[in-house]
Image: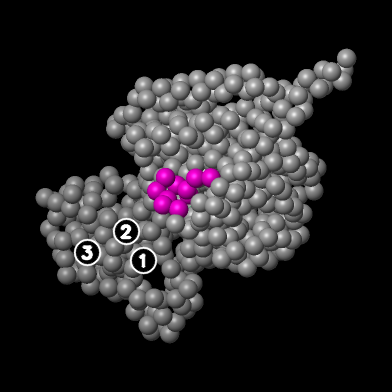
């Protein structure tokens, strides 16, 4: 196994799929000559040509819609959006067309489309470049929402996404592109809807996805020093959601913290809390806690930005207050 | 001998165009009746008055070319050969409907006939037409995409993004704007900086023309030209068909925004009456044949309504079917 960065893990899968399946095409702004805003597609246009790796105009809505149409017409498109914030311009296509076509056509038209987008704060890119909207997409029936946190997951989940028959929102945390990890060289896939016990523990469960898995894991190390044995759950996909894994861990530890970068109010963490109280209420020793992004547009100044995002310290504090 | 045979074939084709327009007209009248009787709910947008556009355009494409449309889609669906009974059943919300009762009037689909749907977000289906065009081009299928939309769509961002995309990628898409002069109750002149809609395509270097949308042969011939252009890998083509809807925007429209005189004036240019007269002048049609066609159509539409009426409602246990494909 080789140690590679998450962006390379993604590129490996894209490359494999471009090689093995003529129908696979990639479309996005500056993914060709420029190499992609985050370097994921670097070299692919040179290797596969401008038709299969297409630079697009800055037209998020039309490009995503074109991806949907191309999928309807027999291609296997991957659309890259520079950041998740720009996916708002394509909301109409994603929500009104991609997610609903299979249903409203009575099962005639499915949309095998992967929409990749970078997300997350921490790089002082301020209010219009730092969202985590995973939970917004997870709200929508008809979509699948993938939130990898390691190079291994990124490569394996993207493989699954490219074989799925439905529209997949594939969210890549900007802070993780350079993260290195062990990744097999041979092909493999990671199934949707199967969370991973990232770190086993008995006293408290910390649930995270994407970037927050790593925060949770670091917090767990600190907690271990204080004699608290935390279990960290890496969700991998929000839709489908591995409810069983969540409930199993909640029953085991009786204490759950959900961590996410997204805004707290009405967020995905609240959904998890609701599921736990529906299915494991009698096992709980404390109310389910949430460590989320602050309910503000992302500020630019470093101290403010840091304060607006979940932190390890906060996770530790909340955990200690629970046990 | 050959010429006689060609003439006969041409006559059959022409009569078929008339038959299709008559079928649409009668089907829509029946739909209105069924709406009034509470059999059809939701929005119901009738195609009455615009028949020549859907029929003429559809006659100009191949059976394996793609068609994409908006919510005013019954006419094009019928012209495409979707079963009248299955369309009516969809309007009734029955399981036997073309979209199994999931779509309703605004979302007719029949993939087996490459009728890729009616869409109800104004302008939202134009990007899909581009994508289908991209698939045709990249998979070298030799097919093209015919995309219908209204004059209301041309002020949407997705319209402009799509035309640009179709042009830079030379996509085989024929954009067909049915300019019926109104977007709901708003006259096109009040909301369009350039009310000659075809001119907008010039900004994207897409060849564009206007056609009399009440003349089925003119529509067919121009769409043929556009289709040849697109199929010949010369890229997109833009057509503005000037037409008029004789009925309200939907069944809920009190029509406060236009005068009876205006509607009357357009009704005098009825595409069906006009084409019938032309065929009679050419000796291709007489009163007897016309009446025979009328009664055949009456039967088809009655059968469609009866089929819809007798079809079962979807079982509530199927509510969650078709959210995801396995
Ligand atoms: C994005 C969007 N905005 C508004 C509406 C509401 N609406 C439905 S039809 C319509 C008028 C569209 O007119 P046009 O495109 O000219 O088509 P026509 O109804 O004349 O066939 C409007 C405003 C909608 N469906 N979608």
Q: Earlier in the sequence, mark 1 or mark 2?
A: 1
**Place of residue A283 in the rendered image (x, y in percent of width and height, measured from the top left):** 13, 51
- Of residue A224 and residue B184, the one placed in the foreground of this image is B184
Secondary structure under badge 1?
strand
Q: Chain of mark 1?
A: A
> What residue sits right under mark 3 in the picture?
A289
- Neighbor class of circle 3 (other Cα within 10 Å; few <14, some 14-19, many 20+) is some
Q: Chain of mark 3?
A: A
Q: Earlier in the sequence, mark 2 or mark 3?
A: 2
Residue drawn at x 73%, y 37% as measured from the top left: B217
A16 sits left or right of B225 in the view: left
| Labels 2 and 3 in the same subunit | yes
- Given contact means CB atoms under 8 Å apart, are the residues at marks 1 and 2 in contact? yes
Residue drawn at x 58%, y 44% as measured from the top left: B267
| Labels 1 and 2 in the same subunit | yes
Q: Is residue A37 visible?
A: yes
- Of residue A112 and residue B34, the one placed in the foreground of this image is B34
- Classify the position of the N terminus of chain B by image quarter: top right
**Place of residue B151 in the rendered image (x, y in percent of width and height, measured from the top left):** 59, 55
- Of residue A218 and residue A306, the one placed in the foreground of this image is A306
How far is the residue under mark 2 from the one under mark 3?
13 Å
| Labels 3 and 1 in the same subunit | yes
Q: Is residue A221 visible?
A: no
Q: Which residues are magenta?
A: B246-255
> What residue sits right under mark 2 in the picture?
A268
- Given contact means CB atoms under 8 Å apart, are the residues at marks 3 and 1 in contact? no
Q: Foreground mark, 2 or 3? A: 2
**Place of residue A69 in the rendered image (x, y in percent of width and height, measured from the top left):** 59, 46
């Amino acid at each position: 196994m080789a140690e590679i960065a998450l962006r390379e893990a993604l590129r490996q899968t894209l490359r494999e799929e471009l090689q093995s399946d003529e129908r696979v095409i990639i479309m996005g702004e500056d993914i060709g000559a420029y190499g992609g805003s985050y370097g994921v597609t670097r070299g692919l246009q040179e290797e596969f040509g401008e038709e299969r790796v297409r630079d697009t105009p800055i037209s998020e809505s039309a490009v995503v819609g074109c991806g949907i149409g191309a999928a309807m017409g027999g291609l296997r498109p991957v659309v890259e959006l520079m950041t998740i914030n720009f996916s708002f311009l394509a909301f109409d296509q994603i929500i009104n067309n991609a997610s609903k076509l299979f249903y409203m056509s009575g099962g005639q038209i499915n949309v095998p489309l992967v929409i990749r987008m970078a997300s997350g704060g921490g790089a002082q890119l301020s209010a219009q470049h730092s969202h985590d909207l995973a939970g917004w997409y997870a709200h929508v029936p008809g979509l699948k929402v993938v939130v990898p946190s390691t190079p291994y997951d990124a490569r394996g989940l993207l493989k699954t996404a490219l074989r799925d028959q439905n529209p997949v929102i594939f969210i890549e945390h900007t802070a993780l592109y350079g993260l290195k990890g062990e990744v097999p060289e041979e092909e493999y896939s990671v199934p949707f809807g199967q969370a991973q016990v990232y770190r086993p523990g008995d006293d408290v469960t910390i649930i995270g996805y994407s970037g927050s898995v790593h925060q949770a894991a670091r917090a767990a190390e600190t907690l271990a020093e204080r004699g608290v044995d935390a279990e960290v759950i890496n969700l991998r996909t929000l839709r489908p959601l591995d409810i069983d894994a969540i409930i199993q861990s909640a029953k085991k530890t009786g204490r759950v913290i959900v961590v996410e970068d997204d805004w707290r109010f009405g967020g995905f963490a609240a959904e998890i809390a609701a599921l736990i109280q529906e299915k494991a209420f009698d096992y709980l020793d404390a109310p389910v806690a949430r460590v989320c992004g602050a309910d503000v547009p992302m500020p630019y100044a470093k101290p403010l930005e840091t304060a607006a995002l979940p932190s390890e310290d906060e996770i530790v504090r909340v955990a200690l207050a629970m046990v | 001998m050959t010429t006689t045979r060609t003439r006969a074939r041409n006559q059959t084709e022409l009569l078929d165009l008339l038959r299709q327009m008559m079928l649409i007209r009668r089907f829509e009248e029946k739909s209105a009746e069924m709406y009034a009787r509470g059999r059809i709910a939701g929005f119901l947008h009738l195609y009455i008055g615009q028949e020549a556009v859907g029929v003429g355009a559809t006659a100009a494409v191949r059976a394996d070319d793609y068609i994409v449309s908006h919510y005013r889609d019954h006419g094009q669906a019928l012209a495409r050969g979707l079963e009248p009974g299955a369309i009516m059943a969809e309007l009734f919300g029955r399981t036997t409907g073309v979209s199994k009762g999931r779509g309703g009037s605004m979302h007719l689909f029949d993939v087996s006939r490459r009728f890729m749907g009616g869409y109800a977000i104004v302008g939202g289906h134009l990007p899909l037409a581009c994508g289908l065009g991209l698939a045709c081009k990249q998979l070298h299928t030799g097919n093209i995409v015919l995309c219908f939309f209204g004059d209301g769509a041309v002020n949407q961002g997705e319209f402009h993004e799509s035309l640009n995309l179709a042009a830079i990628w030379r996509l085989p898409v024929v954009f067909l704007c049915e300019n019926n002069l109104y977007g709901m109750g708003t006259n096109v002149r009040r909301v369009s900086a350039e009310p000659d809609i075809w001119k907008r395509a010039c900004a994207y270097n897409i060849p564009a023309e206007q056609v009399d949308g009440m003349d089925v042969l003119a529509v067919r011939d121009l769409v043929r030209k556009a289709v040849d252009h697109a199929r010949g890998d010369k890229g997109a083509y833009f057509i503005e068909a000037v037409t008029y809807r004789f009925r309200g925007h939907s069944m809920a429209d009190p029509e406060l925004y236009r005068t009876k005189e205006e509607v009357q004036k357009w009704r005098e240019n009825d595409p069906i009456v006009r084409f019938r007269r032309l065929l009679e002048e050419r000796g291709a049609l007489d009163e007897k044949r016309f009446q025979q066609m009328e009664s055949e159509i009456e039967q088809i539409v009655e059968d469609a309504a009866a089929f819809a009426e007798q079809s079962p409602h979807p079982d509530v246990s199927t509510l969650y079917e078709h959210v995801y494909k396995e």
